């Protein structure tokens, strides 16, 4: 990816691209989604290249929501969801999840949260911060509810390739989902390309056009260098990234074992690269635990309540680092937890 970018820079490819993004990249994403999921997205008007999924999330909210319209979102969830809904004048409606359902949303709770103002459901599996993966049946039920109430589905599938125990379920590929789903994905996680800032949205042409209009006046286009590197990733990076993903699967077992042995009960995450242990037995809240662990043991975790109130009593631990570092962190966490036993 780096080589592709350097070579294209040396050839002077430093211009703007189409507002929708480089045609070659949209063609490649369209072909990829067809090969992987049999999804047909027209690269001319159904795919928009964005500055990461972060921008795509902001655009989709601003394109869809009228003031006061509600978006239902299971929590704990990624930190930007609520702010993006609020920036767009919408109202986030949280559905708390807990370890009892392995942090997977119960479809009936979604149904119970629907009001005349509900516009969309926002889901993201595998989940940041919990690593939860929703079973296919659960997602099918969610799609059926969206259909019944004529709601949009926004699905952030940035961790799709990091699904360890079961094949990933792609929401727009489920029966009845395609025409009401805005699918978000990107290159940050599966290809470890966070700094290149390339994501994309795929969905109904009218919604993608509305998103493109906001994108055109705020970003103009995603940077061409990142788009060229992403094109290389999607065309030639799949197998290399699979090696990295296999590594994550091993690290996942090391971190979960280490946390449980340290006295922090932790479920085995089905996807992404986060473990979300309970810290309740220490008697500390999530913020105090995280701050003290940082200062006393130089280990960084994120307080669970950063991802929604129901994340209180947990912390998020990333295992996107080497096994050696994970093992060292586990020893330090065990030493820290002992202080409270
Ligand atoms: C669930 C989820 N969505 C979106 C993002 C942002 O991704 P990007 O780098 O594509 O903006 C992240 C980054 O951590 C994430 O975890």
Image (tube, grey):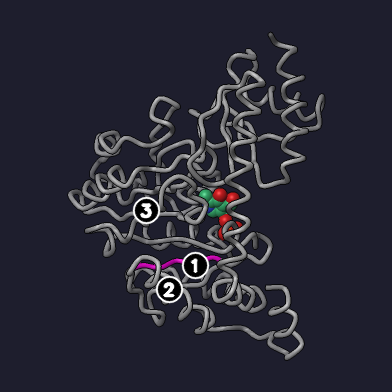
Q: Quadrant of the C terminus?
A: top right
| Mark 1 CB near ligand 1 (8 Å cut) | no
Q: Is residue 102 above or below residue 20?
A: above
Residue 104 horizontal/vertical position (percent): 39, 36
Q: Is residue 312 above or below residue 154?
A: above
Q: Nearer the viewer, residue 266 or 143?
A: 266
C-alpha distance separating marks 3 and 1: 18 Å
Q: Is residue 144 visible?
A: yes
Quarter residue 241 falls in: bottom right
Residue behind mark 3? 169
Residue behind mark 1? 200
Q: Is residue 222 visible?
A: no
| Mark 3 CB near ligand 1 (8 Å cut) | no
Q: Nearer the viewer, residue 331 or 285?
A: 331
Residue 278 horizontal/vertical position (percent): 56, 23
Q: Nearer the viewer, residue 70 or 120?
A: 120
Question: Helix or strand or loop: what does disc 2 sit on?
Answer: strand
Crowding at mark 3 (Cα within 10 Å: few <14, some 14-19, many 20+): many
Question: Helix or strand or loop: what does disc 3 sit on?
Answer: loop
The boundaries of the magenta stretch are 199-203
Question: Helix or strand or loop: what does disc 1 sit on?
Answer: strand
Q: Do residues under tags 3 and 2 come within 8 Å of each other at their CB atoms?
A: no
Crowding at mark 1 (Cα within 10 Å: few <14, some 14-19, many 20+): many
Q: Nearer the viewer, residue 313 or 318?
A: 318
| Residue plotted at (46% across, 81% down) | 27
Which label lies toward us, 3 or 2? 3
Residue behind mark 2? 47
Quarter residue 226 falls in: bottom right
Q: Quadrant of the N terminus?
A: bottom right
Q: Earlier in the sequence, mark 3 or mark 2?
A: 2
C-alpha distance separating marks 1 and 2: 7 Å
């Amino acid at each position: 990816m780096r080589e592709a970018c350097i070579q294209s820079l040396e050839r002077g490819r430093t211009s703007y691209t189409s507002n929708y993004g480089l045609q070659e990249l949209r063609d490649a994403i369209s072909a990829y989604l067809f090969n992987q999921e049999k999804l047909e997205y027209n690269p001319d008007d159904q795919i928009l290249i964005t500055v990461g999924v972060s921008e795509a999330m902001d655009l989709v909210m601003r394109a869809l929501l009228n003031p006061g319209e509600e978006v239902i979102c299971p929590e704990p969830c990624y930190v930007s969801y609520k702010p993006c809904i609020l920036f767009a004048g919408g109202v986030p409606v949280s559905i708390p999840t807990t370890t009892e359902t392995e942090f997977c949303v119960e479809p009936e709770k979604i149904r119970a949260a629907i009001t005349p103002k509900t516009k969309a459901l926002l889901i993201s599996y595998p989940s940041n911060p919990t690593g939860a993966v929703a079973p296919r049946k659960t997602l099918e039920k969610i799609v059926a509810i969206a259909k019944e109430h004529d709601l949009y589905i926004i699905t952030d599938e940035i961790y799709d390739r990091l699904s360890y125990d079961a094949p990933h379920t792609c929401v727009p590929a489920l029966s009845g989902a395609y025409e009401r789903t805005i699918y978000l994905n990107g290159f940050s996680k599966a290809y470890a390309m966070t700094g290149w800032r390339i994501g994309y949205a795929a969905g109904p042409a009218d919604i993608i056009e509305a998103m493109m209009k906001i994108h055109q006046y705020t970003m103009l286009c995603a940077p061409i260098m990142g788009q060229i590197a992403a094109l290389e990733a999607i065309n030639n990076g799949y197998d290399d990234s699979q090696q990295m993903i296999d590594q994550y699967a091993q690290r996942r077992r090391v971190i979960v074992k280490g946390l449980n042995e340290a006295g922090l009960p932790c479920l085995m995450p089905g996807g992404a690269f986060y473990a979300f242990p309970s810290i309740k037995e220490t008697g500390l809240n999530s913020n105090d635990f995280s701050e003290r662990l940082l200062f006393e043991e130089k280990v960084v975790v994120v307080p669970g309540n950063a991802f929604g109130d129901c994340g209180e009593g947990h912390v998020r631990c990333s295992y996107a680092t080497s096994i050696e570092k994970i093992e060292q962190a586990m020893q330090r966490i065990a030493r820290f937890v002992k202080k409270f036993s």
